[in-house]
Each structure stands twice: as structure tokens, then as C-alpha cells.
Image: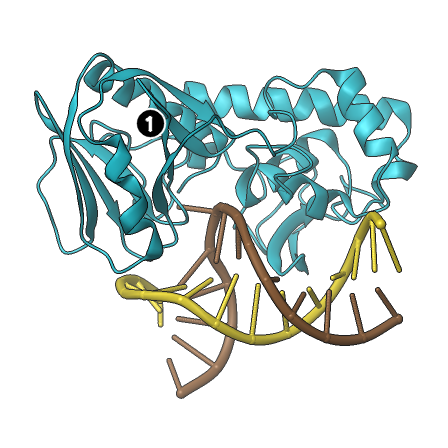
Chain colours: A cyan, B brown, C yellow
Amino acid sequence: MPELPEVETVVRTISPRLRGRRIVEICVFTKKAWGGSVAPGEGQAVRRVRRYGKFILLELERGFLAIHLGMTGKLMANSEHGPYTRAVLVLDRGEIVFDDVRQFGSVRWVESEPGMLGPDALEVSAEDLMALLGARRGRLKALLLNQSFLRGIGNIYADESLFRARIHPLAIASRLSKPRARRLHAAIIEVLTDAIAKGGSSISDYVDADGRPGWFQLQHKVYQRTGEPCLVCGAPIRRILVAQRSTHYCSKCQRA
DNA sequence: TGGAATGTTCGGCT
DNA sequence: AAGCCGAACATTCC
């Protein structure tokens, strides 16, 4: 569920329920190691809510609560607790419920703002991205998934961005022509912006903080469309493995 | 039954 | 050294 557009949507919908509220108590219902490290967040007011790559950052009076949705995490305001509720933030008014079926997500209190990842995929300039690409030998798809290279993109938006830019997922970054690199930058911004406008992609069971699904999955051009005709040229969409992840592309539109 | 699912990390190999 | 590969984490759904 959670790549940049989904996380951004959650941040936007949960921010008005959290800003200015005090976290009275943090209840954790999981054996995962992050359980013990949230206590310093208790009793503190939430100054604001931000996104850092795929992390949801609650800026507290001292330190931050860094929430990662993993693969199946959901953060909802005033939702019923269920069998997959892993944590609850009890506020001075209302509460925030963190559900996560697969438990790849996490909630952590950190002293200082995280800053080890690459530039944000929505904010990076064309010049900066082109310079970063020029210095890398790796395959584009793998690089786009690497949060230390560029933060925010995941499997859906990597495939959709490469299709929009008409670039093959196995292309070597440093060998991209300038026009193609520029096209990739534009495609990333356009795909992410469009997805945010649609409230993200609700594959499986993604919902925002108010329980509403997103609609961008209806506009996926290649992701999970293996065998179906390319919406531009009609050739069947292919699926290969890159960096152990399913990768969907049109072999006609995205030449090597 | 096996494989795949929006993610990340770690160890080993080249 | 960078990059690649496989495995691991936990659970559900074809």
C-alpha cells in the first residue's frame, strides 16, 4: 500500500487530526523490537506531521515518531481495533490506530530528524537527478527502488514512471542520454503528482486516515497488467524480475 | 501446493 | 567498491 503518493495522502488526511494534539499514551500490540522505543513520545504534543520518503514523521516537542507502513500498514483516525491492530496512539482527543497485517511496518521514536536517504522523488531537480544517474552503473529499476538513491518511489511508481518515460527497466543509469534522463525526471514528477491527486493506489486494501480508498490503480499503465495490451501500442505487457521484484514494461514502447 | 503481494535489511559473492 | 543475488521477516489470497 505505501509508496510516496499513499504516504503523502495519509499525511494530508491525518495531519488535521494530529496537529496540536497531545499523545497521552502509546499502546503497542506486537512482539516486534520497535515496541520498547516509543515510550519517549508519550506525553508530548504533536507540532506537525510530515513525510520523509515513505516515512510519516510526527514532529514532537522533543524528537519525532517515525512511522513506516511497510507493505500492509494503515494509519487511521478513530477506527475500530481489529486483529491486525499493532499500535494505538491515544490522544487528548480521539486516537490514531495503526493496523498492519504483515507486520513489516514500524513505529519508532527518534531523537533527531532522519536524513540518511537520497533526495525526495517529488522535490529533486532535473539537474540533480541527472548528475546522480550519471554516477551510477546500476539498472534503472533497481536504482529507483533504492531509497538511499532517491526517496519515496516503490515498485508501482518505478514501473509506471519508466513506462511514461519510455525507458527500459534494465537500462544502465550512467548510459542514459540527457534527453532520456530529463524525460525520466519529468515522468516521475508527473506520475507521482497525478497519483497524489487521485488519493494513491488502492491495491489490496489501502485506505487513507479517514478510511477512503485511492483511485490511481485505475490508471496503472503497466503495473500488474502482465499479458494485457499496452494502452499505447497494443503489444502485450511483459513481466520480468529485477532486484527480486516484479517489473512490468512494454517491450515495444520501452526499448533497451 | 506454490507463488506472489505496495518494503527493507543483511550477508555473501564478484 | 559497487552492484547483484538470495534469504529473511509475517500473513493472506489466489
Q: Chain of mark 1?
A: A
Q: Amino acid at mark 1?
A: Val
Q: Residue at x 77, y 41 (%)?
A: A254
Number of labelled discs?
1
A154 and A31: which is toward the camera: A31
Question: On the image, which quarter does residue A31 sit in?
Answer: bottom left
Q: Residue at x 17, y 26 (%)?
A: A43
| Left or right: A20 as drawn, with respect to A148 | left
Q: Which residue is mark 1?
A: A10
| Left or right: B6 as drawn, with respect to C14 | right
A217 and A56: which is toward the camera: A56
Residue A171 placed where, x, y %?
82, 45
Q: Is residue A108 visible?
A: yes
A217 and A98: which is toward the camera: A98
Compared with residue A75, is residue C6 higher up or lower down, i.e. above or below? Answer: below
Q: Secondary structure at mark 1?
A: helix
Q: Residue at x 32, y 44 (%)?
A: A37
Residue A219 placed where, x, y %?
49, 32
Question: On the image, which quarter does residue A45 sit in?
Answer: top left
Residue A237 placed where, x, y %?
64, 50
Q: Is residue A199 visible?
A: no
Q: Quick one: label 1, few (<14), some, or many (20+) residues within 10 Å?
A: many
| Left or right: A131 as drawn, with respect to B11 | right
A95 and A80: which is toward the camera: A95
Q: Residue at x 75, y 34 (%)?
A: A166
Residue A99 placed where, x, y %?
23, 46
| Left or right: A212 as drawn, with respect to A111 | left
Quadrant where the image shows the N terminus of chain A: top left
